[in-house]
Amino acid sequence: MEQISDKEIVHSNVTFESCEENGKNIQWFEESLEADLKWSLAINSVMYKGTTKFQDVALLDTKHFGKVLVIDGKMQSAENDEFIYHESLVHPALLLHDKPKTVFIMGGGEGSAAREALKHYSIEKVVMSDIDQEVVNICRKHLTANQEAFADNRLHVIINDAKMELEKSESKYDVIAGDLSDTREGGPCNHLYFKSFYESVIKPKLNENGIFVTQAGFAGILSHKGLFSSIYNTTKQVFKYVIAYTAHVPSFADTRGWVLASDQPFKLDAEVLEKRIKERINGELQYLDADFMLSRTVMNKTVDTSLLNETNILTEENEKFLFGHGLLAADSV
């Protein structure tokens, strides 16, 4: 494991600092949440740092959150609480579907979304299409919680842009899930949030009664207008039935949001969902049960009002970026 010894090292978007506390040298990873807001994590070691063809990548062993994956300077998941994000992304869609057999995951290179999907007995095939081979290799090597999922013969890992992979494939899926980075200037997956993509690629690749779900950025009372409300409104332009839901994820220092969509109405029945959890899932969920899952669809007044009143639609001509920048934008600075 690689130790960072300089006082401050900036690896493009990934910043480390070192300082002494009580006579001990403590290393820190610093993340800029906004232009005027940062937070820092004490780290034991840097397990990997490098620049791939698409993004800056670091895998850190932190004192508080365990192993943390950082892409373009932004935390993507943390070992100790990633189950909140990935259970929320995967299980509502699979449980609301009457009998899901096939899942396509856009992104998801660390393998956690695939791990959750493969817990369902009915699943026959999971396709995970991530653009970055190096990220997949790093996670496959170091994230031991997902090694069983990577070894499952139902999982098919494809290194390709998810849009290109869906376009060339003749297959359709019961569930398509967007386990993607947030939109950022120069980011590799901004186009996977556009209305045209939902309309011309996602929707035609869903089976009848199929469900689309995507992570939708920060959904806190101060952060939800950055991306969450726009993704919700964009999805509403394409699908008949759309549900937004949220969960607080400690390692993100905020609430995260997801959007579910289908052309068939959702059956939001706690008794039915709890029965499906018991019958369909191999093992125990750590975060969700039926009642709690349904409660996540209730927003506070501020966020709910924003969702109802949002008019912005994400398109090629009307992109929206969260704070920070991807590798392509950094190279042009």
Image (cartoon, rainbow, N blue to C red):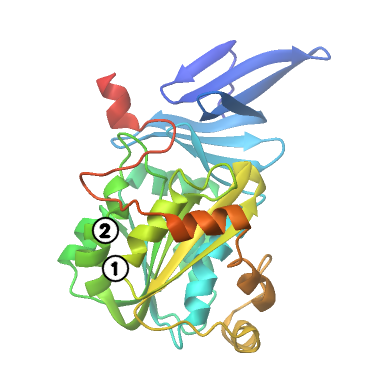
Where's the C terminus, which quadrant? Answer: top left
Along the viewing direction, whichever of 119 and 232 lies nearer the viewer: 232
Along the viewing direction, whichever of 87 and 295 lies nearer the viewer: 295
Q: Is residue 23 above or below residue 175?
A: above
Percent from the top left, x then y, of residue 311?
36, 54
Residue located at (23% from left, 66% from top): 199
Which residue has dot 2 on it? 195
Which residue has dot 1 on it? 238
Left or right of residue 28, residue 140 in this image: left
Q: In this view, does 16 lie above or below 242?
A: above
Left or right of residue 108, residue 303 in this image: right
Along the viewing direction, whichever of 265 and 132 lies nearer the viewer: 265
Q: Mark 2: few, some, or many residues within 10 Å (few <14, many ≥20)?
A: many
Task: Say which amino acid is labelled 2.
Answer: Lys
Residue 303 visible within the image: yes
Pointer 2 and pointer 1: residues touching (CB < 8 Å)?
Answer: yes
Residue 147's mark? none
Percent from the top left, x then y, of residue 61?
62, 36
| Residue 226 occupies quadrant | top left
Where's the N terminus, which quadrant? Answer: top right
Task: Say which amino acid is labelled 1.
Answer: Val
Percent from the top left, x then y, of residue 23?
81, 12
Measure how far apart labels 2 and 1 are at the Cα level: 7 Å
Which element carries disc 1, helix, strand or loop?
A: loop
Q: Mark 1: few, some, or many residues within 10 Å (few <14, many ≥20)?
A: many
Please tell me which of labels 2 and 1 falls first in the chain: 2
Residue located at (19% from left, 65% from top): 200
Which element carries disc 2, helix, strand or loop?
A: helix
Residue located at (30% from left, 65% from top): 237
